[in-house]
Structure formats: structure tokens, C-alpha cells
Amino acid sequence: MSESESASEPQLEARPVPAAVGGRNRLRAAMWPPRVSRGQLVVALLLFSLGLALAIQVRSTNDHDQLRGARQEDLVRILDELDSRQQRLQQEKAQLEQSMAQLENSSNQAKEAQEQTRKKSTELGVLAGTVKATGPGIVLTVDDPQGQVKADMLLDTLQELRAAGAEAIQINDVRVVVNTFFTDAQGGGVQIDGKKVSQPYRFTVVGNPQDLTPALNIPGGVVRTLESHQARATIAEQQKIVVDALTELRTPQYAKPAAK
């Protein structure tokens, strides 16, 4: 190619990038994403707290300035409103305290009534034979090797124990209740509430041993009567007797509660 042809062709020249444009790009890359240090965060929180405190102080100062510039009639009115509001709050507080005391009293009364009902139900269950009973008492064992003990002798023994203050009784595995009955079984032996009970007859009794034992040992009493029929009666006093035989509660067929 000749020099003339080279001279006639256009030449492409590289244009330099302005320094301002390159600086902005570097600045943008340095600032985003922002890099915040822990110290900067602490400073920012301190500045925020300081600004909030200043705002509250300014507002309080403005309120004080408004009150300072108010007329005497306005100040008296404001004080009266504050006094009335305080009295209403005191009345509401007293009413709430009274309501709370009434609720606590009602709750305590309800709990006491429930406790008394439960206690009374348990006591009636012991007497009815539907609840187990425990306490001091005696165990009377009647051995009858000759088969001479009859139903009426066991009934007399039961009556003597009741008269001496027995509170819960079972004979062998039969709970004695108010309608318990004794019959002589065919072929010998005794039936209690229609259930055959074999000897030795074991009376488990809850009551005061100091009252029960002497009542059985009086001259001509239960022990002497049983011994006269070749039976042997043994009494053992214990500090803890458990009457655990239970009976099924029966619904009366004819008896109804009488009106007061």
C-alpha cells in the first residue's frame, strides 16, 4: 500500500474516559452495599436516643410554658378536673377491691360448702357401708368347733357392740349395716344378709376399745354366753382397724323422705 493511500484512510483514535466518570463509579462501588461497623451502629443509637430525649424535654417545656402563661381561672379549672379524675379513680379502685373481696369470700364459702358436703357424704357412706372405714377398735374371733353358735347369738353380739359405740362392723367379709339380718342356715351354720358365713366368725369393729372390750366381758354377757355353748371368744385390741367390706346401696321401695 502506498503512502498516499494510507494517508487517505480515516484513522480511529482512542478517546480517554473522563476522570469524573471513573471516580463516580468507584465511589458508588465503595458505598453500596453500605458497610456499617458496630461502632457506627452504637453512635446512631445514641444519637437517636438523644434526639428522642430532646423532643420529650421540648414538649414538656412547651406544656409548662402553656401552663405558665395560663390564666388563674384556667389553672383552677385544670386543678378541679384533676381532682375529679383522681376521685373517680379512687372510687373505681374501691369498687374493684370490694368486688374482689366479695369474689374471694364467695369462693371461700363455696370451697367450705364443698368440703363440708364431701365430709358429710363420707360419714354417711361409712354408716351406710358404701365407704371403707379405719380407726382403733377390736377384732372378736368366735371359734365354734361344736357348731353350737346360732344366728341369735351373733345378733346379740352385734347388738352389744352397737350399744358400746361401735361405728363400723364387718363379720368375715360381710359389711354390717342398718338392715343386716341373721338366719340359721340349713345343715348348720349361719347366714348374714342371705350369705352363708362359715366359722370362725370374725367381728372386725371400729370403735373405742376401752368401751367395746368391757361390754363383751360383763358377767352374763356375750363372752360368757358363747363359752356356755362350747365356743371360744378371743378379743384383740388394735390401734388401727380396717373395715373394707362394702355393701351395695339399696333404694327404698316404700320409704320416702318426709316433709318438714
Image (cartoon, rainbow, N blue to C red):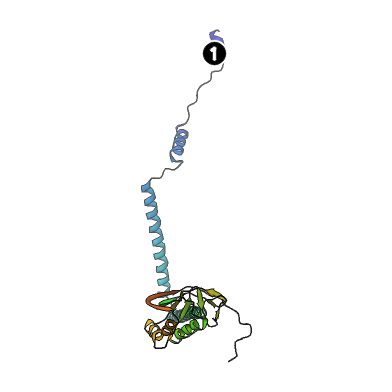
Q: Quadrant of the C terminus?
A: bottom right
Query: Foreground residue, 5 or 46?
Result: 46
Residue 234 visible, this angle: yes
The x, y position of residue 79, in whole percent, is 43, 80
Q: Residue at x 41, y 64 (%)?
A: 56
Q: Residue extending furthest top?
A: 2
Up-down relation of residue 152 to residue 247 (above or below): below
Q: Residue at x 47, y 31 (%)?
A: 18
Crowd tier of the residue under label 1, counting other residues whose Cα lies within 10 Å: few below 14, some 14–19, many 20 or above? few
Residue 75 location (% of width, % of height): 43, 79
Q: Nearer the viewer, residue 187 or 65?
A: 187
Percent from the top left, x then y, of residue 174? 51, 75
- The extreme right residue here reads 254
Q: Nearer the viewer, residue 172 or 20?
A: 172
Compared to 159, does 143 lie above or below? above
Q: Is 194 displayed left or right of 100 in the figure?
A: right
**Badge 1 amino acid:** Ala
Residue designated by label 1:
7
Q: Which type of secondary structure does the marked residue at label 1 adopt? A: helix
Q: Residue furthest bottom?
A: 260
The image quadrant where one finds the N terminus is top right
Percent across and percent down for residue 58 are: 40, 65
Q: Is residue 107 at all visible to an observer of this figure? A: no
Q: Nearer the viewer, residue 123 or 182?
A: 182
Q: Residue at 47%, 79% (x, y): give it.
A: 169
